[in-house]
Image (tube, helix red, strand yellow):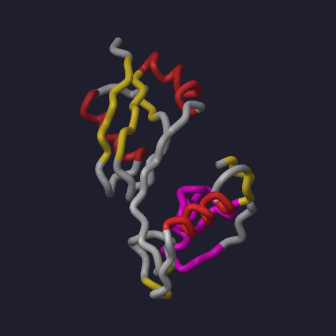
């Protein structure tokens, strides 16, 4: 029985779950999981854990991860990402020091965050982004996040 960690360079468009499904099908192995969900829009390294390697999942999930993003300032979309319909545009400008200050004041330390409707969190067995695409919105509980 083959066990190990397979590192996948995930392209945009596929969910982490879909990558696991494809790997199971192509490799003919049932016991495959992943160590960290990547949003379907995200690209990057997705570790697949095969057979006995699934036991290290908890250790990998606790490790420090680094994320890099490309951001567009001055526009707001209904989905809070690049795929959504633009709701507002602004021509306001700012300096790099203003951005650093805003990050330090709003995105460092422990915060309360309301999960967006366009997320993979589930409500009554259905993913929030599926409900959002149906035009539905549900109340979401704020969660503690340590950034």
Q: Position of residue 143 (x, y in %)?
A: 73, 55
Outermost residue toward the left in this view: 26
Q: What residue is rendered at 53% in x and 28% in y?
A: 60
Q: Is residue 91 above or below residue 2?
A: below
Span highlighted in magenta in the image: 113-137
**Which of the 4 image quadrants contains residue 20?**
top left
* Nearest the eye: 129 or 77: 77
Answer above or below: position of 26 versus 134.
above
Pick the front one: 71 or 127: 71
Query: What residue sits 60% from the left and 57% below the top?
Result: 122
96 lies above or below 39: below
Which residue is depicted at the point 46% across and 74% down?
73
Comparing 16 with 110, the one in front is 110
Identify the residue shown where x is 57% and y is 64%.
128
Query: Of residues 27 and 93, which is closer to you in this image?
Result: 93
**In the picture provided, is 124 more to the left or to the right than 34?**
right
Q: Of all residues shown, which one is farthest toward the top?
A: 1
């Amino acid at each position: 029985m083959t066990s190990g960690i397979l590192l996948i360079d995930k392209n945009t468009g596929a969910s982490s779950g879909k990558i696991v499904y494809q790997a199971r099908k192509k490799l003919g192995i049932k016991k495959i999981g992943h160590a960290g969900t990547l949003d379907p829009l995200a690209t990057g390294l997705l570790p697949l854990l095969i057979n006995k390697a699934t036991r290290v999942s908890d250790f990998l999930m606790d490790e420090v991860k680094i994320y890099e993003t490309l951001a567009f300032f001055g526009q707001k979309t209904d989905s809070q990402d690049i795929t959504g319909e633009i709701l507002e545009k602004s021509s306001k400008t700012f300096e790099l020091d203003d951005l650093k200050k805003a990050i330090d004041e709003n995105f460092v330390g422990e915060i309360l965050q309301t999960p967006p409707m366009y997320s993979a969190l589930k409500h009554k067995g259905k993913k929030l982004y599926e409900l959002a695409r149906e035009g539905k919105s549900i109340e979401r509980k704020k969660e503690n996040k340590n950034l």
